[in-house]
Image (cartoon, rainbow, N blue to C red):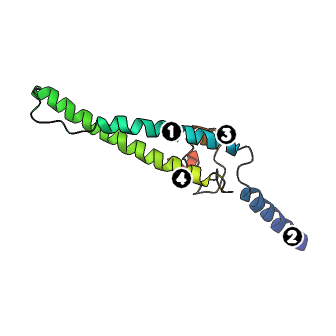
């Protein structure tokens, strides 16, 4: 019985130490470079979208339908801007945490986030199962 308990403790310890090293196939330098490039891209796009969210002046000589379209377009661009700002924040957080041993582990279940997901959505902190939860 003591041997089984000892084996259980040993396997649990091994599982813990394996996880404390993070995701084994994760090339942190490659991911860091990808995140930095994505941050630059998003930072370039934000001012463009901000320009498109400026209020539509009521004195513009545009028709009623065109004004409604402009207001709808402004609303869509505002939502896109909020989304981009949230993504930028997430990317910066991911970049700050890239050297954390838990980077690449799901914050909800503790399982590894697949490397392909990290490369596609580097700011993700949850695996697909938990994100769809």
Mark 1 lies on a secondary structure that is helix
Q: Nearer the viewer, residue 87 or 59?
A: 59
Mark 3 Cα-neighbour bin, 10 Å: few <14, some 14–19, many ≥20: few
Q: Which badge, 4 or 1, comes first in the chain's sequence?
A: 1
Left/right placement of residue 61 relative to residue 98 reads left
Marks 3 and 4 in Cβ contact (< 8 Å): no
Q: Which badge, 1 or 2, comes first in the chain's sequence?
A: 2
Q: Which badge, 2 or 3, comes first in the chain's sequence?
A: 2
Mark 2 Cα-neighbour bin, 10 Å: few <14, some 14–19, many ≥20: few
Q: Quadrant of residue 68?
A: top left
The image position of residue 122, as x and y in percent, is 57, 44
Q: Nearer the viewer, residue 118 or 91?
A: 91
The image position of residue 86, as x and y in percent, is 43, 48
Disc 2 marks which residue?
Answer: 6
The outermost residue toward the bottom is 2
Mark 4 lies on a secondary structure that is helix
The image position of residue 16, as x and y in percent, is 75, 62
Mark 2 lies on a secondary structure that is helix
Residue 93: give its label: 4
Disc 3 marks which residue?
Answer: 30
Q: CA distance from mark 1 to mark 2?
A: 51 Å
Residue 24: give its label: none
Residue 40: give its label: 1
**Residue at 65% from the left image edge and 56% from the top image edge:** 100
**Residue at 15% from the left image edge and 31% from the top image edge:** 67
Residue 102 vertical position relative to residue 42 in the rendered view, above or below: below
């Amino acid at each position: 019985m003591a041997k089984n308990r000892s084996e259980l403790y040993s396997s649990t310890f091994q599982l813990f130490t394996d996880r404390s090293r993070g995701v084994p196939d994760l090339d942190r330098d490659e991911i860091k470079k990808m995140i930095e490039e994505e941050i630059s891209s998003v930072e370039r796009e934000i001012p463009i979208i901000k320009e498109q969210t400026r209020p539509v002046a009521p004195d513009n000589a545009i028709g009623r339908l065109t004004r409604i379209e402009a207001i709808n377009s402004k609303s869509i661009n505002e939502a896109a801007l909020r989304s981009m700002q949230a993504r930028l924040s997430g990317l910066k957080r991911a970049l700050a945490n890239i050297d954390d041993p838990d980077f690449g582990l799901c914050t909800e279940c503790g399982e590894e986030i697949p490397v392909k997901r990290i490369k596609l959505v580097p700011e993700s902190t949850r695996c697909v199962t938990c994100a769809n939860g």
